[in-house]
Image: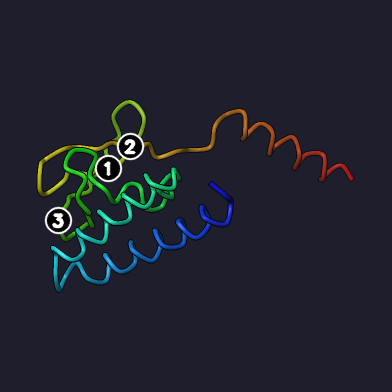
Amino acid sequence: MSAAKKRIAVERIHKLFQLAQDMIHEDEELAQRYITIARKIAMAVRVHIPKEHRWKICRGCKKFILPGVNCRVRIQHRREPHRVITCGYCGKQMRFPIKEKTKRAYAKNSTQSEEKAKR
């Protein structure tokens, strides 16, 4: 596939997610249909669904989920802090890490700031 086709596909996926988010309160079936179409476009063109939209699809039932509408979001602090999203349709729990600055990145930033202070 050409880069132009992939770019167009990603734009359409963004648009379909926006339409689904706007429509979820009025017609839930239509919003689910938009997400199905977006997934089919991504599979046909062989592109990944963008990261900002990926968590809005349940990994169990593949339906569109939106916090406060048809899913529950909780923060867990056990082990490493993570966000737990529970689907309102199938009950599947999905966990997403809440990333903190790593020690390496912190050390790198502090070294750079010390070098700037010396100048």
Q: Residues within 10 Å of mark 3 (few under 14, many from 20)?
A: some
Q: CA distance from mark 3 to mark 1?
A: 17 Å
Closer to us: 78 or 63: 63
Q: Looking at this rendering, what residue extends furthest in the front direction?
A: 1
Closer to us: 42 or 62: 42
Determine which quarter of the picture holds residue 43: top left
Determine which quarter of the picture holds residue 75: top left
Tell which tag, 3 or 2, sits nearer the viewer: 3
Q: Looking at this rendering, what residue extends furthest in the top direction?
A: 79
Residue at mark 3: 70
Q: Are discs 3 and 1 less than 8 Å apart at CB?
A: no
For numbered disc 3, what is the local secondary structure?
Answer: loop
Residue at mark 2: 82
For numbered disc 1, what is the local secondary structure?
Answer: strand
- Residue 91's place in the image compared with 39, above or below, is above
Q: Residues within 10 Å of mark 1 (few under 14, many from 20)?
A: some
Sequence-wise first label, 2 or 1? 1
Residue at mark 1: 75
Which residue type carries mark 3? Asn
Q: CA distance from mark 2 to mark 1?
A: 6 Å
Q: Are discs 3 and 2 less than 8 Å apart at CB?
A: no
The number of numbered badges drawn on the structure is: 3
Closer to us: 19 or 52: 19
Determine which quarter of the picture holds residue 30: bottom left
Residue depicted at x 39% and y 40%:
98
